[in-house]
Image (cartoon, helix red, strand yellow):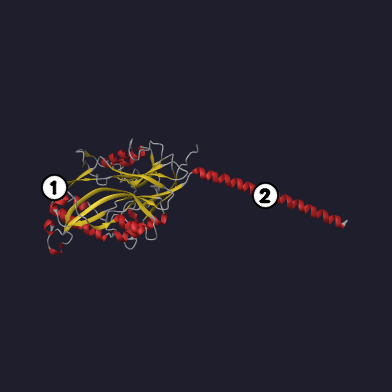
Amino acid sequence: MHARALGGRAGHRQGLLAAAILMLVGALLFAVAAGDADAKKKKAKGPKIGVMSRNIYLGADLGPILDANSINSAVDAGGEISNQVDRTNFPLRAQGLAQEILSKKPDLVGLQEVALWRTGPVDAAAVTTPSASNVEYDFLELLLAELNKGGNNYEAVVVKQEFDAEFPVNDDTSDGQNGLAGADHNERLTMRDVILRRVDSKVKVSNPNSGTFSTLLRVNVAGVVSLDVTRGWTAVDAKLKGTKPFRFVNTHFEAFDSSGQNPTNTGQSLGRGDIRAAQASELVGAGGPADPAPKYPVLLVGDLNSDDDTVQPNGDRNAYSAVLSAGFTPRENSNSVLPLSCCLDNPDLNSPASAVSDFDHQVDHIMTEVTKVKLLSSLVTGLVPVNGLWDSDHAGVYSKLRMPPKKKK
């Protein structure tokens, strides 16, 4: 009887063990099925992409030469600008800018103010026909060199030349001579906007394109030379497996139309902020490079020199409003979160870390259509000085986005 009792307990235990195994197998099968369902659900959400907008600062404040009221004062102001470019030391700043980009590894980057500084002999005629060719600082070349030190990391896929101007400059007053009589050389500034692509990105680009806005600010230097401030846009078509094709557009709207009346290349004079507003309307309007009407999503990045929440209602917000009206929405750090992307008050860039308080408004934007692209996260970069200099007078804006999935046929 004792033996039979032992056998009964063993059978009971075996039954419990079998039941437990069946429950475990069932749980595993459920987990696998649930995992498959989650994977399909995640896959259906669409792939992620990282994008960045970065104004890297041309290296100097151009205000002194734009405000000059004579040739001699313009030549001296040009010398101040030339010396300031040396002080802001782009070869050094490129190190910090490269680290900003490499730390976030954006798939696509829109760069603004990618200056090319060249010098030549004193030549007044070059004011109307720029000709200086001795490269002093090529910001694109210097930045790419830093980005690619550890390998082939980033490539320029669109480079757009914009404002191009040259002037004799007096950058050495130790000889006691001022103005044109003291001019030491010609200084030439060529502005460019650029799109970078991470080389190992799964985002493939094609159809690089660029254009110039039809409405431009016309400035008069020293009362004798009129120059149009060329501004425009760069764009690429892009593909990412599992998503619809999309367009990536980078731009930089006018910064100096903040007077009550501002002359243009069309002969009209427009009010405060209205030149950049006209540029915005052209960019996002019907048939424009960032027209959101087509079925593909549009990612718009750039320095719009405009916002709706952090500037006074004096015309400065008109460009931003035009972009919003076209159906775009911001996809960057909230305007309620400080610090933002703009702007260091010191054009020499040698302010202490406490100057981060200067970054109190937002003109650098990442924008997409509301229903097509989802914001996952965003942050502002470049909010501390590196090696004694800030990377730029702007900060960078980075966003991680989820692209809409491509519908299966």
Q: Choose top left, top right, bottom left or bottom right for residue 296.
A: top left
Disc 1 marks a residue whose amino acid type is Val
Residue indicated by mark 2: 25
In x, y percent, where is residue 27? 65, 48
Q: How dense is the environment of label 2, judged by Cα within 10 Å: few (below 14), some, or many (20 and up)? A: few
In x, y percent, where is residue 353? 34, 60
Residue indicated by mark 1: 224
The residue lying at 83 percent from left, 55 percent from top is 7
Left or right for 303, reference 202: left
Q: Is mark 2 on a helix, strand or loop?
A: helix
Rendered-image quadrant of the N terminus: bottom right
Q: What element carries label 1?
A: loop
Farthest-out residue, right:
1
Question: Which of pointers 2 and 1 indicates the residue nearer the eye?
Answer: 2
In x, y percent, where is residue 52? 38, 50
Q: Which of 248 and 215 is in front in this view?
A: 248
Q: Nearer the viewer, residue 392 or 344?
A: 392
The residue lying at 82 percent from left, 53 percent from top is 8
Q: Choose top left, top right, bottom left or bottom right for residue 187.
A: bottom left
In x, y percent, where is residue 248? 37, 44
Residue 181: which disc?
none
Indicate whether 5 appears above or below 46.
below
Indicate whether 96 appears above or below 321.
below
Who comes first in sequence, dot 2 or dot 1?
2
Visible in this render: residue 384?
A: no
Visible in this render: residue 111?
A: yes
Left or right for 169, reference 294: left
Disc 2 marks a residue whose amino acid type is Val
Farthest-out residue, bottom:
174
Q: How dense is the environment of label 1, judged by Cα within 10 Å: few (below 14), some, or many (20 and up)? A: few
